[in-house]
Amino acid sequence: MNFSWAVCRCFFYKNIFIPELGHVEFHGRQQFVKTYLEGLRKLDAENVIADIEAEINRRRNINGITYQNYLVIKEKYKPLNSQLFNKETLFSLPPTIQGVTECIDGVFNFPLMSLDQCGLLVEEIKHFKQANLPHQRPNSMNKNGILFTEIGLDDLIRSIVDAVQPLSQEKFPALVGSTGFDSFKAFTVEYATEASADQDLATHFDNAEVTLNIPLFTEDQEGNELIFQTKRGFRPQEMEIGRAILHAGSQQHGVLPITSEEVEFGKGDGFKIWKGETKCARVGTKSM
């Protein structure tokens, strides 16, 4: 696999999520304290700044670590379902997206993957995590999950991106445009009731033009629904295995907490694809 990437300059100072402050910008300690003085009165400012600097450092190193992890995983990992890693043997997706419902203003859901297809992915994710190979957390807000690029599933994600791109262009023409997407980031998120796991997700927006959610596994338990902020307040959206949810990355959303018994894979475990056109200044490119 040939790795090439470019990073928007704003990636290193914008859209940094602090639970008590929301999404913040960081241009240095003096600017940050001045801008967020009111919110910082009830917090330990030094700890908050340390967390932000650690997150910026993580972002600066994420691509290099992704590549190193990819090399280790490629050498040592033995897939359970090898067909997922070969574009010639990948399962097929609908040639045309049908059954699209606008469940909430600007939020669309539709059938995309079958139960069997979702099951294959869940098996592979479990199998990979049992291998105890190095991998990064999916993002700064989720503790548990994997990056599909690291384990070599970019062909699978590309097939999903290609399948939903026409719908994305139809529903979000101002965001996607006629040329389509030039990048994507795909990862899994996992929720459970144990203390070390993610139990919910604070309201936030995504650093992408468009976000696609695909639930891979559900359980009969309370909570863990997606919620979206609308003009009338927050609206919940039930998740169903294989039924994708498409929305603008700027749409404020979150995940309600799990309130019932612990399960191995909680309701709503699945993966997200952040997709977008590059609209900001880039900080170079890198190929390996």
Image (spheres, rainbow, N blue to C red):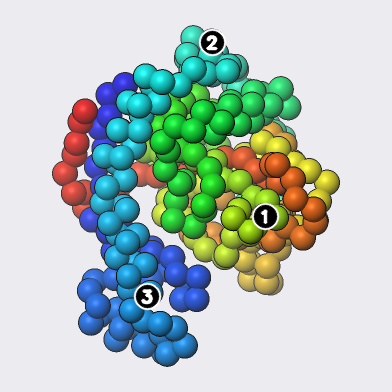
Q: Are marks 3 and 2 in contact (CB under 8 Å)?
A: no
What residue is pinned by disc 3? 47
Left/right placement of residue 248 relative to residue 118 reads: left
Residue closer to the observer: 156 or 58: 58
Q: Residue at x 32, y 70 (%)?
A: 50
Q: Residue at x 30, y 33 (%)?
A: 68
Amino acid bearing label 3: Asn
Give the residue number, with chain letter if any, for mark 2.
Answer: 89
Is label 2 or label 1 in front? Answer: 1
Q: Is disc 1 surrounded by few (<14), some (14 to 19) or many (20+) residues within 10 Å?
A: few
> What's the mark number on residue 106?
none
In the rendered image, residue 74, in percent from the top left (x then y), is placed at 38, 21
Q: Are marks 2 and 1 in contact (CB under 8 Å)?
A: no
Q: Secondary structure at mark 1?
A: loop
Image position of 1 with respect to 179: above or below: above
The picture quadrant where one finds residue 115 is: top right
Query: In this orientation, which residue lies closer to the viewer: 240 or 231?
Result: 240
**What residue would you read off at disc 1?**
194
Q: Secondary structure at mark 3?
A: helix
* Outermost residue toward the left in this view: 284
Which quarter of the rendered picture does the C terminus lie within?
top left
Q: Quadrant of the N terminus?
A: top left
Determine whether, in the image, residue 27 is placed left or right of residue 234.
left
Q: Please provide percent x and percent y for residue 16.
A: 38, 64
Gap in angstroms between the C-alphas marked 3 and 2: 49 Å
